[in-house]
Amino acid sequence: MALKTLRELGERGLIERILRLITPLPSNPLPPWEDASALELHGDLVALLKTDMLIWSTDVPPGMRPRDVGWKTVVMNFSDLAAKGVRPLAFLASLGLPADTQLEVVEELTRGIDEASRHYDAYFLGGDTNEASEITVAGVAFGVGKRERLMRRSGAKPGDILAATGLFGDTAASFKILLEGYEAPGDLRRRLLRAVYHPEARVREGVALAERGVVTASIDSSDGLAMSLHDLSRSSGVGFRVEHLPITEEAMRFAELHGIDPWKLALYGGEEYELVFTVRPENLEEARETLREVGCSLIEIGVATRDRRLIYIDGGMEKSIGGGWEHFKSRPPPAPQAA
Amino acid sequence: MALKTLRELGERGLIERILRLITPLPSNPLPPWEDASALELHGDLVALLKTDMLIWSTDVPPGMRPRDVGWKTVVMNFSDLAAKGVRPLAFLASLGLPADTQLEVVEELTRGIDEASRHYDAYFLGGDTNEASEITVAGVAFGVGKRERLMRRSGAKPGDILAATGLFGDTAASFKILLEGYEAPGDLRRRLLRAVYHPEARVREGVALAERGVVTASIDSSDGLAMSLHDLSRSSGVGFRVEHLPITEEAMRFAELHGIDPWKLALYGGEEYELVFTVRPENLEEARETLREVGCSLIEIGVATRDRRLIYIDGGMEKSIGGGWEHFKSRPPPAPQAA
């Protein structure tokens, strides 16, 4: 019998298989393979840890500068702490580098990492360098939070309002430009690409929401809005009905320009780092006010349902929300340009 | 002017350049790029973090099973916490995997990681999977220690005894067998290779030494004994005189068999995870007793000197200790067999 490969299994299937083999931590503050891992520290304090890897050949689109790559590695990791409502304190990186890498590339990577760490009020504490066949940055985020304030993927109840810290679609449009040859006028192109080259993590937003305790379930949207909804749905045992198209003006213009379904851009992007969360209707105004205080608008996009289906309303029609980006199964982007 | 590559610069040079670009953490409990990174938590508690990456093409010798690769990734990371005297509590891993990797390979990797984590009384908390061109395991170790008990690379004074938690040479001999075609009788070969395939980290030893507060400087020997001595020397501002050849019986037999200088095997191995440390002469017996209580023999190998040279005594002659393994500059081992 042929052995299964990861391509057949997909990332979700792989993670399920891995989880079966891991000895569970007793009294785990977060279930395994949440957005981040947690561990009891002292009193009600928990350590939050996240590691996520950026790999040049699969994760770096054409035109992205090494400094932006460093920045993005921090954002990827901090975003997962933000989704749990925990402030990152420190960042580490293991760098895998080919021997013929130019020093300047590594210096720029480092500048990007340091810059992003400080931007979120954390420190880059160092890490390790290793010889590798392609540039690989394994990032580590560390933070400390209060156990009873942790936001989880589970906890959404039917009737809860579904909301986000921002709008979607820019990265999906950008990948069409960068990887599929779509065109866009200079200014629009620049604004779309910025979402890919220089994303932001919603750290202040996540921490503020957690401190108020108004969120019932939370995740970041790094695998795309659709996948975030699938994950919240599976963890909370609810469905979602997305009633308002959460798309940026820029992505909408791009969709119109090319006759693309704007829903596709909003749902299936990935590498967007908004928080997707649920609140009870009676707490919606408090959540909105909490985000406003840190300079962010709460975007109301739908509602959690008892019925576990994931649907969106397009011109009065109910349509089904499919899966999002998945490693191994999805077609990888083409190889990037050299640094 | 041509831009410098990492091959010209070497790992040490690279790290110096990176350190110049990093905003320093105020009141850092450990200087940057020590064996691990530290961060103040609460009261006198500090968080210790380490990340180190294992890359299939450069770090996995022929014949090593995926389960051993998982084990070793934990040992590599826990060893650095042990060298600082801190007990690891948790392990995380970012896995980079080609899409055609067999599920069984990842399952065995996971079993090795879980097994090693539990062996050292810690838990594997999960991490992340990513698509990559070769198998890459970025490990993260996390532990909590007391600030005033942290062992550092600095602190050795002239006259301090230089000691280790074990003997050296097995991995250097093993790499000659695995990578250069040297031969050894079956039983000797098996015992030598075990050091490469299934190393141990000195966690109990490091924690016990730190609790007693008898160590003046400490490092692990993952880059080889010679490099450990260079690092202790540079950080502490002392030299070392290695008076007793710290070599295993097996490596000595292998050296005799092939007419190899046994000092070369003992000094320039790497991927051995002994602790190399210094103690004041008046504390030597207490350190010896401390290690004995956790089932380990203290190996006295030399003395710290005011004169900053690194020398060893071979048949009454003083000889100089050169550098050890260094990424980018050193010749990498040949590509391993497929899993």
Image: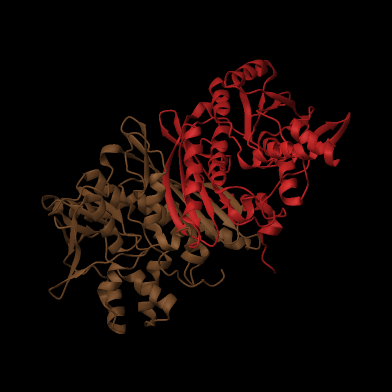
Chain colours: A red, B brown
Identity of the residue furthest to the right in this view:
A316
Q: Quadrant of residue B258?
A: bottom left
Q: Residue at x 20, y 53 (%)?
A: B278
Taking the image as drawn, is residue A87 in sight? yes
Taking the image as drawn, is residue A28 in sight? no
Q: Quadrant of residue A192?
A: top right
Image location of residue A274, percent across then percent down: 64, 33
Q: Tell me if residue A258 comes above or below residue B120 in the rendering.
A: above
Image location of residue A189, percent across then percent down: 72, 40
- Residue A243 placement, left or right of A25: right
- Residue A299 placement, left or right of B175: right
Q: In terms of depth relative to the viewer, which is nearer, A107 or B318?
A: A107
Q: In terms of depth relative to the viewer, which is nearer, B53 or A219?
A: B53
Identity of the residue furthest to the left in this view:
B282
Image location of residue B96, percent across then percent down: 57, 55
Q: Residue at x 69, y 58 (%)?
A: A7
